[in-house]
Image: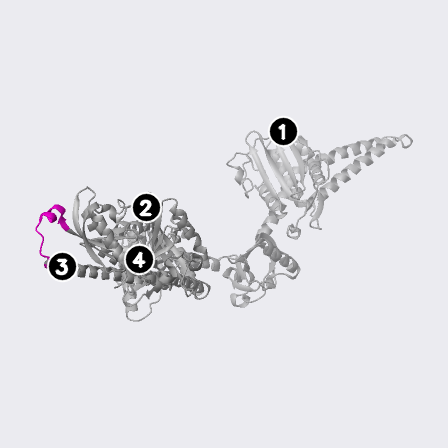
Amino acid sequence: MTQKILVVEDDPVFRNYLHQVLKYDFDVVTAEGPLEALKALEKDSFALMITDLRMPDMDGRALVEKVRAEIDPHLMVIVITAFEDDWPMDMAMSSDVFRYLRKGAFLPSELKQNVSKALEMRGSIVSLEEYKRRADISETIYKDVFEKSTDALFITDIDLQPVALNRRFTELSGYTLDDLKGKTLFDIIDERDRLDAKRAFNAQIDGKPPGTIRLHFVKKDGSIRYVRVWARVIREIQDMSSAVFCMARDLGDAQEERSASGPSVEKLQQSLVEKDRQIENLQRQFQRLTDHAKDIVIWLDKDFACEYVNQEVSRTLGYTSDDLLGKQIPWEEIVHHEDLPLVEAWRDATGKKTADMEGEIRVYTKSRYMLFLSYRISFQYDARGIFSGLDIIAEDITQQKIAEQELRNANRKIQEFNARLTNGVSRKIRALRESEERYKQIVEDSRDIIFSLDSEARLVYMNRIGLKTLGVTMEDIFQRPCREFMADEASEDMLRKMIDLIGSGKAPGPFDISIETPEGRKIYRTTLTQIGDPSRVEYVCIAGDISEEIATNKRLQLLATIEHYSADAIVGLDTDRRVISWNHGAAMMFGWSEEEAIGKPGLFVVPDERIREADEIFEEVRRNGLVKDRETQRKTKSGRVLDVLLTITALKDASGNIFGFSAIIKDLTEKKKMEAALIQSERLAATGRLSASIAHEINNPLYGIRSCLSHVLNTRKEEIDHQFVRLAIKETDRIADLIRNMKTFYMPNEGGVQKVDISESLREVFILNRKYLEEHAVKLKFAPDDAYYVECIPDQIKQVFINIVNNAVEAMPDGGELRVDIQHNADAGTVSISFQDNGVGIASDELPRVFEMFYTKKTMVKGVGLGLSVSYGIVRRHGGTIDVKSEERKGSTFTVTLPVKSLWARQMHLDLE
């Protein structure tokens, strides 16, 4: 008969998967949940149940326990779950679960193997149960014959104490075996018949053949019953009496028997002969029953001496009645030494008036072959409750034990086989399972939408990203036509065309479809392939979202167009600094065409004197990833040197490794010329503003010199006072110092970048502007406590200071206070100079524009609006910053921060010629 398998799984997809895997090799029935499973189990017989754990109505663990307790205790169970915390594996396996599998962690072949092993184990268990059932048949048969006989049957020991009686005897006499404990057969025989009964039993003991006797039984209720009793003494080989088997037949009421006219002697003799014949038949049947019974029967007296053994003792143990009858059983020889305490327990039980005991014991045959016996012991007590003997009925269960051992060995071999599989072949299975799990994880975690269709283009499966993109669950899309999610008919037609192409035996290439999502229409690049067998066709689609890619391509095309036609030079370099891209702007700027430039070393546009600088720039790019807005020089094909602004970026891959460089070069030649002109213009404007102050500074000593010379001219030679001559010389020196300061301030430095004391530079500015400050009633607070050195171009920095001072003075039309402070930040390596006035201030909406070129809020034209813009450019070229804080009607603070040491000092010099 085919063994049926019941699959209990609430997930329709996984339930269908299990059915598809097993249906070709096994008789499989599926149930949607525990309640349906219970109905199926009550209706039909199953050899194996495969169940999930976490299910509605009832979990799998409760289902297994209920089935084992109420329906089939031997049903094999395989648990498949993704929630192993609900029933830990070790606990499940200890509850006779055959196998515990995790969802997604086994192959179809592994599932089939486990199912086959479970069914094989089920067959072994059924065979063992059948063996046990057959082993009990012999005992059941003779008990049934004895119990259901129409005659009253009873057995006594040699003292005529009843040891067994059937139901008919109880009906005839009213006595049960418990009622007769401590009594003999003579106690229920009427006194007038006891003497005849004793003579008949003594004759049996003396060796006479069995016979019958008529006598009266005294029933339990005191009434008298006339019966005929047939008795036979059961003897063994030495004719030693062991038990008496009796059969009684009701002869009717005693009074009726006595009053009725008796039959003729001849008829009575014929009747007696017939009854004797029947009794002899019954005696032979009982003898055959005891001799051929498969159970060992041993009776012991109160001293544990052997009173009776049946033929099975000799057949099973090899001991004859001569070896045992009337003797003490040699327990130490027969019983296994580890089971000898059981014999002592029997002896101890006699003093506790124990009625019955049962168990198992190991014994040796006479030839020293060990057997396993299952025994039952009945303890006998006389009317006073004193132990009078015990009956041992034992069954040879050696073959059963061997079968159990073989089953255990088979199970051990199965476990060893599984272990070998685990250590050997199972490594491949585990690798395949891990591979399957890995690919499943890849599918579920893929950024592409992966879904499968049946032969009717209905959805069977979709991965996590697909469900999230569509805003649905697996239950929402299962078995729905795929066209419902298509954005247009063209996509539907394309999918159907590709399926037909596969049907014709061809492999379709990638194709694009449009899908409607909650976020709008998206375009997917799709590949289609067929899986499964001819009986179950399934198509797997992998769809990658290319909506952003399409938009990106459009943006890239736009950027490529911008890059190609940009006026700036955009150059791509590989890691060896060779040119790999050269845009139109680079060709226009340097004169080399793209074909000429590609493959050349990137230094071919660098002037010789700038080679070292270029190497340093690239080293900085490698360290920091970027060099931005660095002023330098490059040469053209014609040899002309250009002032340029250079930005270089290191290009890195996903691992952070540099695979190239991108350089953007802006031509600053014309701009720098304009800046030089603007600075010169600002210098000239400052010169104009200071001319009155300078004239006053020169006029005062000139007036003193003229007065001294006039006095000397109008005094006689011998009366000339030399004090006036010394005064004139002092005033002349004063004019010389003033002219020298003017020359230092206004003439460009030929040496470029110098190490300058900012405190001294500020003093020179304030000396030249002293008169200018006094005329505008501006009080100067400047008292540096130390020298503060920075690397800079002195005349450019002085120009910045003059521009800021002029702006501060003009912001205080009614006079005020200008406070100048210097601070050194050693950690940052900078020096900060702050100029704080208490003038009219700057509105907050104007602050962002104060450094813009030509921007001014002055009420009258006093310049061209370039002062702060030029100052901002000078400070930036020095690697510094210039910041402003201001509040209307309270004043402004300009802060110039300069690096103590300039790393790129060579680029700061601005040609003013």
Q: Amino acid at mark 1?
A: Gly
Point out the frontmost of discs 4 and 1: 4
Q: Earlier in the sequence, mark 2 or mark 1?
A: 2
Mark 4 nearby-residue class (10 Å; few <14, some 14–19, many ≥20): some
Q: In the rendered image, which quarter contains the N terminus?
A: bottom left
Helix, strand or loop at label 1? It is strand
The span from disc 2 to disc 1 (Cα, nearest Å) is: 139 Å
For disc 2, the marked residue is: 382
Q: Amino acid at mark 2?
A: Asp
Task: Please report contact status of discs 3 and 1: CB closer than 8 Å, yes or no.
Answer: no
**Would you say 679 lies left or right of 362 here?**
right
Point out the frontmost of discs 2 and 1: 2
For disc 4, the marked residue is: 241
Mark 1 nearby-residue class (10 Å; few <14, some 14–19, many ≥20): some
Helix, strand or loop at label 3? It is helix
For the point 64% across and 60% down, the residue is: 611
Q: Earlier in the sequence, mark 3 or mark 4?
A: 4
The span from disc 3 to disc 1 (Cα, nearest Å) is: 167 Å
The part of the chain drawn in magenta is: 251-266
* 260 part of magenta stretch: yes
Q: Amino acid at mark 4?
A: Ser
- The mark found on residue 816 in the picture is 1
Q: Nearer the viewer, residue 651 or 365?
A: 365
Task: Please report contact status of discs 4 and 1: CB closer than 8 Å, yes or no.
Answer: no
Q: Which image quadrant for residue 447? A: bottom left
Q: Position of residue 342 (x, y in %)?
A: 41, 52
Vertical comparison of 475 with 506: above or below: above
The span from disc 2 to disc 4 (Cα, nearest Å) is: 20 Å
Q: Position of residue 241 (x, y in %)?
A: 31, 57
For disc 3, the marked residue is: 269
Q: Position of residue 763 (x, y in %)?
A: 71, 37
The span from disc 3 to disc 4 (Cα, nearest Å) is: 29 Å
